[in-house]
Image: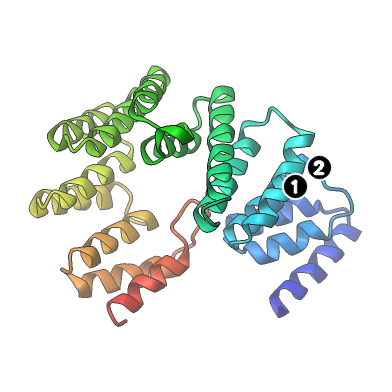
Amino acid sequence: MKSILTTLLLVSAGLALGAPGFDTARGLYQRTEYAQSLAVLLSLPDKDAKALQLIGQDQYMLGEYKKATEALEKAATLAPNDPGILHWLGRTYGRRAETSNAFSAPGYATKARQMFERSVALDPNNKEATGDLLDFYLGAPGFLGGGLPKAEALAKLIGQTDPAEGHYAQAVIDDHRKDYSQAEEQLRRAAELAPRQVGRVMALAKYLAKRGRIPESEAMFDQAAKMAPNDPVILFERADIYIKQKRNLDAARELLEKYLRSPLTPDDPPRQQAEALLRKIGA
């Protein structure tokens, strides 16, 4: 509470000097200071679509999914063809489907799919939106709009503008089918097409570990770490693999402690997940 009040006082002083409150809130959001960002946004006298979107994102990150939905619905009313707003609205409906009762969940899931589909139709180059829609198609039953044919069509659409991402999407589909050798081949193709993208190397490292090919996985993780020595995601994902497989637990502890000291962003796994992993191994 004290940090929020301090933030509000600083923002009020900044506004008196003409400083833009939205930029302050966006900076706080990028530093994962969601409560402080939300406090700033709620203090703004006028809230346009972008401010309402960021309010919704803050509330989503804080686990306030109903409030997030309400803010993002207002944002979508003001900007009905903004793919970013629609994507986040899909995410909030998805979380509400996961956390609601059996009567409400199907309706929320359907709305999540609709928002994801609208977002992707407007901007098929948004990897996060296409990734969320792919996960929905693979995870939802047919009566909610899921299914392998839709996933396959989406992977082809992705591949038209980003071949490496298209191969990654196909790898996810092949793994879902339990066609593990083909999934690995697709991941290798993605890495070959985008050799400078550390995420491609890390995806292959994680998959090899999942298949029990530990030495190969370790070599790929080492390669990823050399490409991006301070990338927090590499630290987290490697520690997560170690803990799931109950090996290298001392190394996992060191990786997570380093992760928690890193300057995290909303694109990184939440601090709470890293802290939960540390508790799992008694750290």
At 26% across and 59% down in the image, what residue appears? 238
Residue 277 drawn above or below residue 238: below
At 59% across and 48% down in the image, what residue appears? 92
Closer to the camera in the image, 264 or 77: 77
Tell me the SS state at disc 1.
helix
Tag 1–tag 2 contact (CB < 8 Å): yes
Closer to the camera in the image, 67 or 45: 67
Q: Name the residue beneath numbered marker 2.
A: 48
Question: Along the horizontal axis of the image, is 219 left or right of 54?
Answer: left
Amino acid type for the residue under numbered disc 1 = Leu
Closer to the camera in the image, 192 or 139: 139
Amino acid type for the residue under numbered disc 2 = Asp
> Residue 231, can we see it?
no
Question: Along the horizontal axis of the image, is 106 left or right of 72?
Answer: left
Colour scheme of the picture = rainbow
Q: Which mark is residue 200?
A: none
Query: How many numbered circles does the render carry?
Result: 2
Label 2 neighbour load within 10 Å: few <14, some 14-19, many 20+: few
Q: Where does residue 175 sit, x and y in percent of width and height?
A: 23, 38
Q: Where does residue 157 sit, x and y in percent of width and height?
A: 41, 20
Mark 1–mark 2 Cα distance, whole angstroms, equals 6 Å
Question: Along the horizontal axis of the image, is 151 left or right of 209?
Answer: right
At 41% across and 32% down in the image, what residue appears? 142
Q: Quadrant of residue 88?
A: top right
Q: Where does residue 177 sit, x and y in percent of width and height?
A: 22, 35
Q: Name the residue beneath numbered marker 1.
A: 52
Residue 154 drawn above or below residue 269: above
At 21% across and 52% down in the image, what residue appears? 221
